[in-house]
Amino acid sequence: MAHILAVSNQKGGVGKTTSVVNLAAFCALSGKRTLVVDNDPQGNASSVLLGRASGASIYSGQSPHQTIQDNLWAISSGEDLLEQEKALARSEGGRFALRKALTPLRADFDLIFIDCPPNLSFLPMNAFLAADHLLIPLQSEYFAMEGLSQLLAFVDDLRQDVHADVAVLGILLTMYEDRHPLARQVADQIRQHFGPKAFAAAIPRDIALAAAPSHGQTILSYDPLSPGGLAYLAAAKELLHVLK
Ligand SMILES: Nc1ncnc2c1ncn2[C@@H]1O[C@H](COP(=O)(O)OP(=O)(O)OP(=O)(O)O)[C@@H](O)[C@H]1O
Ligand SMILES: [Mg+2]
């Protein structure tokens, strides 16, 4: 039965999609049958893994497509996703639509990553209610901490109000710049507060990670030995260790 991970942070551009596609690529490389569900109308994960975001989303019954990598499948964000979100928000039980859609897929995969949009709207809520684990990519900057408390409070409310099972699995520092005292300060605070839930691997700012998507590739195929590639490999190893 697959572990389902929601990858979320309501702040935009912090490395959610980059983390989803690259962690998924390394998990698939290690032999895990891995599915990426693009739960973001922007469709960025879909364009990296499938070359496009088109047709229907998982909410309208889209099924997994094999990517160019072994063991790695993806369900594209659809052109319908924004409309679907509005419809789900109006419908009874719409919060559980993603959970329902993933239930029959759980047996086919070891890992399911859900990429989320930069907000706390109905789509991330669906992800939190479908997932076992929450993975939070966090950019090491001052305002990151405020956003983080908001996200954690949102998830706590779901746990209380509708008995969501999701729990924070880890915080992954992204675009980390070791030379910046402020980045180190944020990292120290995160490690103090979250202890072992803060990944030991921090993802450095690396031009290779930014360039890979423009070639429709993950860092594994584009430049696995780049600092960013090695960092995502280390993070994927940690992730698989925690899930063991
Ligand atoms: N470690 C990194 N080093 C350099 N560039 C990065 C790194 N991580 C992500 N980027 C780049 O930063 C931008 C934002 O990253 P990404 O799309 O992964 O963030 P996101 O949180 O998914 O954004 P959104 O909130 O819009 O969904 C992208 O152009 C990406 O290529
Ligand atoms: Mg994204």
Image: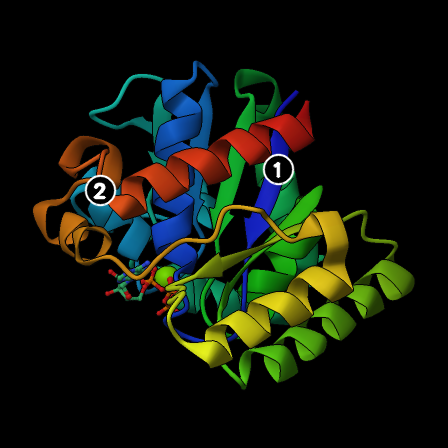
User: In the image, residue 199 lies at what x, y percent?
Assistant: 59, 48
Q: Name the quadrant of the N terminus.
A: top right
Disc 1 target residue: 4
Label of residue 202 in the image: none
Q: Amino acid at mark 2?
A: Ser
Residue type, mark 1 in image:
Ile
The residue located at (17%, 51%) in the rendering is 208
SS state under label 1: strand
Q: Residue at x 74, y 59 (%)?
A: 194
Earlier residue among tags 2 and 1 = 1
Mark 2 closeness class: few <14, some 14–19, many ≥20 residues within 10 Å:
some
Residue 231, given in percent of the width and then of the height, sits at 38, 43
Residue under the image location 75 percent in, 54 percent down: 195
Callout 1 crowding tier (Cα within 10 Å): few <14, some 14–19, many ≥20: many
Residue drawn at point x = 82 percent, y = 66 percent: 156
Q: Nearer the viewer, mark 2 or mark 1?
A: 2
User: In the rendered view, would you say 133 is above or below 183?
Assistant: above
Tell me which image quadrant ligand 2 sits in.
Answer: bottom left
Instruction: Kindly tell me whether residue 120 is visible in this rendering.
Output: no
Left or right relative to 185: residue 192: right
Q: Which mark is residue 226?
A: 2
In the image, is 80 to the left or to the right of 102? left
Q: Nearer the viewer, residue 108 or 217?
A: 217
